Image (spheres, rainbow, N blue to C red):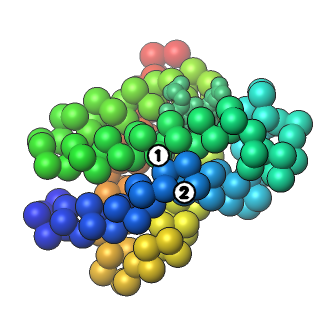
Amino acid sequence: MNSDEVFEIKRTWEIPAASPTESGVAILIQFFTKYPSNLQKFSTFKDMTLDELKDNPRFKAHANRIMKVFDDSVQALDDDYSQLEEIWIKVAQSHFNRQIEKQSFNELKEVILEVLAAACNLNDQQTEIWIKLMDFIYDIIFKTIDELEQDA
Ligand code: HEM
């Protein structure tokens, strides 16, 4: 990514980053509303309604953890991409162990972009830049999943 693109990512990220729990909860609620089967992967939440989830402290903590991964990634854009790789290989490995499939990752990606676009009121150019970053991150995730599948 060039420095203009990094600047746009950082500038737009400030909006959801200002209220990480709220933003993370918005992403996850939208994820489970649109793609409910993903909720079944969460053993602690799977029998709760979305309304109950919104106020559940563990759910909020989980929403925050996801936001932290993105926050670390946005900070890492200033450096070479080795840090970004390190962050997302770890996510791919821990989720591979939980049998989270590429389709679920793609569903979440779509929702993240939707929530970001609405929260930040992204214009077309900013949307393209976010898609570029998400594609880059997802290349790392999917490559790691492929390698782990081959080793299995
Ligand atoms: C953008 C991609 C994602 C990020 C950044 C992310 C981040 C995280 C983090 C930081 C954790 C806790 C630490 C860990 O064990 O790794 C976690 C746990 C978890 N994630 Fe994800 N995740 C992502 C995608 C997904 C997807 C697509 C699913 C599909 C259902 C999922 C399901 C889970 C589950 C079931 C747990 C365990 C929760 C628990 O034990 O309470 N994640 N995730």
Please provide percent x and percent y for residue 120: 43, 73
CA–CA distance between discs 1 and 2?
A: 8 Å
Q: Quadrant of residue 16?
A: bottom left
Q: Is residue 128 visible?
A: no
**Please, is residue 107 above or below residue 72 in the view?**
below
The answer to whether 140 appears left or right of 114 in the picture is left
What residue lies at 68% left-to-right and 60% top-to-bottom?
30
User: Which amino acid lies under the numbered mark 2 shown in the image of this protein?
Assistant: Ser
Q: Quadrant of residue 128?
A: bottom left
**Please, is residue 7 above or below residue 141 in the view?**
below
Pointer 1 and pointer 2: residues touching (CB < 8 Å)? Answer: yes
User: Which amino acid lies under the numbered mark 1 shown in the image of this protein?
Assistant: Met
Q: Residue 67 has which mark? A: 1
The secondary element bearing badge 1 is classed as helix
Out of 80 and 51, give the one closest to the viewer.
Answer: 51
Please provide percent x and percent y for residue 101: 60, 38
